[in-house]
Amino acid sequence: MTIAYFDCPTGISGDMCLGALVSAGVPLEYLQQIIQQLGCGDQIQLTQQLVHRQGQIATQVKIELAHEHHHRHLSEIEQIIQTANLPSQIEAWSLASFRCLAAAEAAVHGISIEAVHFHEVGALDAIADIVCTCAGLVWLGVEQIHSSSLPTGGGYVNCAHGRLPVPAPAVLKLWETHHIPVFSNGIAAELVTPTGAAILSALTTEFGEVPPMQIETVGLGAGTKDFNIPNILRLWLGQPLAVKKKVHPHP
């Protein structure tokens, strides 16, 4: 069984996930094929490049949109995913991630899940982020997902709802709902996006320390900004190790 550990010293976003997955061996062409199956092939193009973050090299994946996106309800997004003829695990993980996000947005705004308008979160790039991340994990044979604690970040961010404090309200609600441990790394910026938080909330078995594992592959996904520490999401892939129990001799 392959397990994955998301090591998030500077947070997590959808594009950082894609960069880490491509760095770990997932072909960009495969992810573009997934976008084609979603019916978005003429609107979304993925590109990859190697970039440096504080002297370390990592993979950056960019999502280029050909057309302006529009707002979508959860039911529309679910229909796109359910009619794409995706492998069952990709579909299940993608739907779970979007439902986590919709529930958080609904709670924050005091409305029903059905009434949630996905603004920039529900745009084509976020659909690509979530579905392609789930597809990449399945391509790598990942069956169990773990994650480190997440950095809180700080400052403010501009979005469709105006200027909001970081962590954004939906992110904070996801952390509260899913009991996600957090810490401060001293960086006052948006480090965990709603998309990144939703993916981990839906897919992660356990947050915190690294599970006993034999690491086989490490994928490095670059964030868009430069900080005083490398802005890199580190995806550790490997096999679980059995924890040896101590045997106490009988008196």
Image: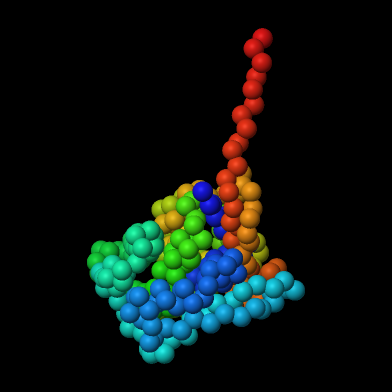
Type of colouring:
rainbow
Instruction: Name the quarter where the C terminus is drawn.
Output: top right
Query: Considering only vertical position in the picture, is 209 above or below 150?
Result: above
Residue located 25% across and 63% down the image: 112
Q: Nearer the viewer, residue 35 or 78?
A: 35
Where is residue 150? Give x, y as percent: 56, 58
Residue 123 left/right relative to 238: left
Residue located 70% across and 68% down the image: 229
Where is residue 165? Give x, y as percent: 50, 70
Query: Considering only vertical position in the picture, is 198 above or below 148?
Result: below
Residue 190 left/right relative to 68: right
Figure label count: 0
Question: Of all residues shown, which one is farthest toward the bottom?
Answer: 67
Q: Nearer the viewer, residue 134 or 176?
A: 134
Residue 70 left/right relative to 9: left
Residue located 57% across and 58% down the image: 6
Residue located 33% across and 83% down the image: 70
Question: Of all residues shown, which one is farthest toward the right?
Answer: 55
Q: Is residue 117 visible?
A: no
Where is residue 207? Give x, y as percent: 53, 50
Residue 246 left/right relative to 74: right
Q: Quadrant of residue 138?
A: bottom left
Question: Of all residues shown, which one is farthest toward the top?
Answer: 251
Where is residue 57? Give x, y as percent: 69, 73
Q: Is residue 140 visible?
A: yes
Q: Nearer the viewer, residue 251 or 193?
A: 251
